[in-house]
Image (cartoon, rainbow, N blue to C red):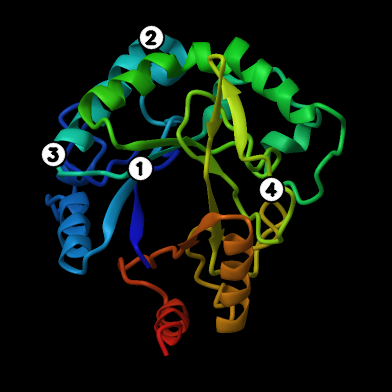
Amino acid sequence: MKYIVLITKHHDGFCLWPTQHTDYSVKSTPYKGDLVKEVVQSARKHDLKVGFYYSLWDRHEKSHDTHDWAYVAFMKKQLEELLTGYGEIIEVWFDGFWKKQKSGWTKKEEISGEVIARDTQANRDETFIQAWRTEGAYRWQMDHVYQFIKSLQPDCLVMNNSTTAYPGVPLHPVDIRSGEKYTKAKEDKKVWNWLGKDLYLPMQIETTLSIKGTSQFPSGNWFWHESDHSVASKEQILKWKRVAEKMQANLLLNVGPMANGKLRPEDEKVLLSLGR
């Protein structure tokens, strides 16, 4: 492993660092510390680079649903904290764009869960990119946010999760593409035109060690569930790694911490077995 990506804020809006821009964070807990700082320090102690996941969708911050510009200003303040307070960050991974993207979808289930079978409609990906550029990118002010990130950390790579409905599709402007649960080798378009130039955009394939999912996410849970002790085998993980290598992509494995903050014992066991 060469890097980790920490979820700093997921869709619920709770922040794992003591942000100055909402009380909905670790500073309002008995812990009162900075989990982001602790994880970053530990990662660097073990020579791991660090990336941050940051949810665009925020179910706690009221401006998310009432005022697009106010919410973008809120996001920028939080991103500035994350990108100026913890040293070099190699990746910012956005997620939740679909909450302000109503157009472009071909089926309702594409925005309500995990899509297994892909529609092979001609030009489907390009059509969705245009829909994103017309609506989502404007409402999220993504061109402005991208430039803001680069002004703080020019070498930080920006990614925007395009969901399992459109794996590998770049939601411009980005530097890398998301291939969520893209665990079978498939033909992958790596060069995309953006602002009149052909750009090589590498892929990060994300999947989770849980393999017993729900009706909404059938191939495995992203978060901890007390009843779920399923875990991918060492052989399965190595197979995913070979798929990523064939697709010239990075493989990022998800482990959902338990309620006590520790990793599931089954996750720990299989991860340690990879080094043997």
Closer mark to the observer between disc 1 and disc 4: 1
Q: Are marks 1 and 2 in contact (CB under 8 Å)?
A: no
Query: Three-letter amino acid code at disc 1?
Result: Glu
Please report the residue visible at 48 percent of the width from the left and 39 percent of the height from the top. Answer: 176
Q: Which residue is mark 4?
A: 114
Whole-percent x and y of residue 63? 38, 16
Q: Are marks 1 and 3 in contact (CB under 8 Å)?
A: no
Query: Three-letter amino acid code at disc 3?
Result: Gly
Please report the residue visible at 41 percent of the width from the left and 82 percent of the height from the top. Answer: 265
Say if 84 sits above or below 204 in the image.
Answer: above
Closer mark to the observer between disc 1 and disc 2: 1
Q: CA distance from mark 1 to mark 4?
A: 24 Å
Q: Secondary structure at mark 1?
A: strand
Whole-percent x and y of residue 203? 54, 47
The quadrant where residue 131 appears: top right
Q: Nearer the viewer, residue 237 or 21?
A: 237
Q: Nearer the viewer, residue 208 or 133?
A: 133
User: Counting residues from the N terminus, which is met first, the one under dot 4 or under dot 2?
Assistant: 2
Closer mark to the observer between disc 1 and disc 3: 1
Query: Three-letter amino acid code at disc 2?
Result: Trp
Q: CA distance from mark 1 to mark 3?
A: 15 Å
**Quadrant assignment for the C terminus:** bottom left
Closer mark to the observer between disc 3 and disc 2: 3
Q: Secondary structure at mark 2?
A: helix
Q: CA distance from mark 4 to mark 3?
A: 34 Å
Disc 4: CA contacts within 10 A as few (<14), some (14-19) or many (>=20): many
Q: Which residue is mark 2?
A: 69
The circle drawn on residue 85 is 3
